[in-house]
């Protein structure tokens, strides 16, 4: 077996083109996940009847089903559903015209919402009730307490988890090629098909993942160190 | 002036305060003494509505609140007349020392940042920790944190400062450093109510001692009277046991 470093370096350059796009999608998924996760966490903390039970079922489904199965379920249902829905309001769209990136966004955001709801709930529940009393004792309203004390302290707990989630999403997006979306991994597969150099291409993909996740970790560590000073311990 | 009338509070069927009547004059330093579990802490917490009493009324200057029909708004209004110093300090962990003291001034009293910082620095100087302003609570010792807790309360210029066993999480030396700060605060004319087990503080710094037991006020009066010539047998017992614990 001969390993062609030339091809590997060329492939790295091709793969790198997918990095900004992958980042953007991962970031979007995280944001949507945090938004919906926050809503779910609120419903669970407040124990809203019926909604709480529905959410429990949703969370356990999302956690119990492998990502790729999830992707295929959405791929086989969402484009058809969207197409007939659009038809009903007078637009024409064939299911195969449905953008694959949307399939990815919907699937991953669902998953992320379930994960982040647990993280956010944990972060809020980790807050010492005495901190809340201290806020009340200096005359805060509930809103002021939430804004000045509770949310900042919960953020300090949740932020490292959010950052970690970003890493996980970037890596999990390597499965997105199965539904036709182009991320780092999909780009590497294209390059491999062109050059017929599979090992070189996959190693190139591996190095790019390793590199960007390494950089992210360094950034995260810096942020976490800053958070720890005013931390919740 | 603070006036408590018929304060009652029950937790899960357990009556902790059984009709407390107490009048506190402006500038008084009141020491609440008595065995553990007699409701001293609960009484303090009802005065600033961290705990809402079931019955009775609370007056601070012109504002009288009936506990049976108090709104969230009234409670916040009353809390803003008072300030609390906690047993476990409860400084805001996500804020620096300076920010801890400035927080209420800016958010609640809507003072400008410059003015708030000026007041905060004065109060932090009073408790002798001006060199720590940029640090976080976690970086300070317990005694230092409690001194900042006192500065945070003082900065608000409350009508009354409520202190819930402010030294009982501290070793004797750190206790002393906090008590000295409190003595200084007392001299400014601040009205204070302090639940304490520090009898020396009750004797030498306070000018009004209230002996509580089982949710009642057993006896109140000047420190001289309570410690040398109490009229109630139970007070006599309590004081004697403290003076001569091993006889």
Image (cartoon, coloured by chain):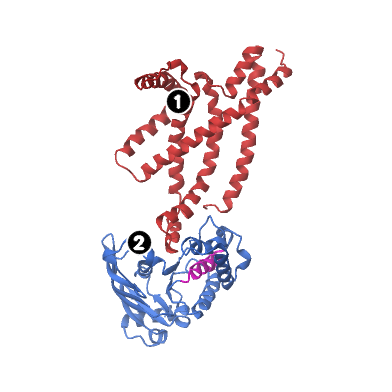
Chain colours: A red, B blue
For the stretch drawn in magenta, the main secondary structure is: helix
Q: Is residue A182 toward the left or the right of residue B82 in the image?
A: right
- Locate residue B36, reporting x and y percent: 38, 69
Determine which residue is flagged by label 1.
A66
The residue segment tinted magenta is B141-157
Q: Nearer the viewer, residue B70 or B226?
A: B70
Q: Are marks 2 and 1 in contact (CB under 8 Å)?
A: no
Are the residues under marks 2 and 1 on the same chain?
no
Q: Residue at x 54, y 42 (%)?
A: A160
- Which quarter shows the C terminus of chain B? bottom left
Few, some or many C-alpha atoms within 10 Å of disc 1 (few <14, some 14-19, many ≥20)? few
- Locate residue A92, reporting x and y percent: 41, 17
Q: Is residue A82 toward the left or the right of residue A178 in the image?
A: left
Q: Nearer the viewer, residue B82 or A214?
A: B82
User: Which residue in the rendered view is the most extreme toward the front?
Assistant: A90
Does the rendering let one see residue B214? no
- Locate residue A72, reporting x and y percent: 44, 20
Residue A168: quarter of image: top right
B153 in magenta: yes
Chain for disc number 2: B
Does the rendering let one see residue B168? yes
Q: Residue at x 32, y 37 (%)?
A: A53
- Locate residue A227, reporting x and y percent: 57, 49
Q: Is residue B88 above or below residue A6?
A: below
* Labelled disc at residue B229: none
User: Which residue in the rendered view is the most extreme toward the right?
Assistant: A6
Q: Residue at x 67, y 20 (%)?
A: A11
Determine which residue is flagged by label 2.
B73
Residue A25: quarter of image: top right
Q: Is residue A74 toward the left or the right of residue B183 in the image?
A: left
Q: Is residue B63 above or below residue B13?
A: below
């Amino acid at each position: 077996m001969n390993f062609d470093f030339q091809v590997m370096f060329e492939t790295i350059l091709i793969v790198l083109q997918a990095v900004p796009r992958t980042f953007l999608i991962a970031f979007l998924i995280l944001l949507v996940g945090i938004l919906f996760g926050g809503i779910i966490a609120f419903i669970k903390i407040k124990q809203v009847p019926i909604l709480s039970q529905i959410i429990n079922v949703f969370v356990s489904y999302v956690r119990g089903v492998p990502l790729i199965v999830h992707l295929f379920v959405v791929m086989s249902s969402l484009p058809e559903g969207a197409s007939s829905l659009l038809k009903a309001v007078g637009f024409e769209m064939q299911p195969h015209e449905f953008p694959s990136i949307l399939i990815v966004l919907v699937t991953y955001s669902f998953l992320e919402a379930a994960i982040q709801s647990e993280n956010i709930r944990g972060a809020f529940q980790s807050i010492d009730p005495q901190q809340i009393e201290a806020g009340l004792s200096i005359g805060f309203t509930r809103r002021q307490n939430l804004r000045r004390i509770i949310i900042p302290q919960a953020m300090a707990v949740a932020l490292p988890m959010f950052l970690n989630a970003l890493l996980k999403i970037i890596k999990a997006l390597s499965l997105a090629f199965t539904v036709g979306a182009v991320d780092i991994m999909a780009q590497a597969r294209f390059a491999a098909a062109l050059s017929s150099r599979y090992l070189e291409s996959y190693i190139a993909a591996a190095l790019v993942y390793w590199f960007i996740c390494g950089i992210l970790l360094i950034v995260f560590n810096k942020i976490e160190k800053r958070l720890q000073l005013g931390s919740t311990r | 002036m603070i006036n408590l009338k018929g304060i009652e509070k029950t937790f899960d069927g357990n009556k902790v305060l059984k009709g407390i009547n107490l009048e506190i004059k402006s500038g008084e330093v009141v020491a609440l003494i008595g065995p553990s579990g007699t409701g001293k802490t609960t009484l303090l917490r009802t005065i600033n509505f961290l705990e809402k009493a079931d019955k009775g009324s609370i007056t601070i200057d012109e504002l009288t609140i009936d506990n049976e029909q108090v709104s969230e708004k009234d409670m916040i209004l009353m809390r803003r007349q008072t300030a609390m110093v906690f047993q476990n300090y409860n400084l805001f962990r996500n804020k620096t020392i300076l920010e801890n003291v400035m927080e209420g001034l800016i958010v609640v009293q809507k003072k400008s940042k410059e003015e708030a910082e000026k007041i905060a620095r004065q109060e932090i100087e009073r408790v002798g920790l001006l060199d720590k302003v940029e640090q976080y609570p976690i970086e300070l010792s317990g005694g230092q944190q409690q001194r900042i807790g006192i500065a945070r309360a003082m900065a608000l210029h409350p009508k009354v400062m409520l202190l819930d066993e402010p030294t009982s999480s501290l070793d004797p030396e750190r206790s002393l450093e906090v008590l000295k700060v409190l003595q200084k605060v007392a001299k400014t004319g601040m009205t204070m109510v302090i639940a304490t087990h520090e009898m020396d503080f009750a004797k030498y710094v306070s000018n009004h001692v209230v002996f509580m037991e089982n949710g009642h006020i057993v006896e109140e009066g000047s420190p001289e009277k309570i410690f040398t010539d109490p009229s109630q047998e139970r007070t006599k017992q309590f004081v004697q046991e403290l003076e001569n614990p091993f006889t």
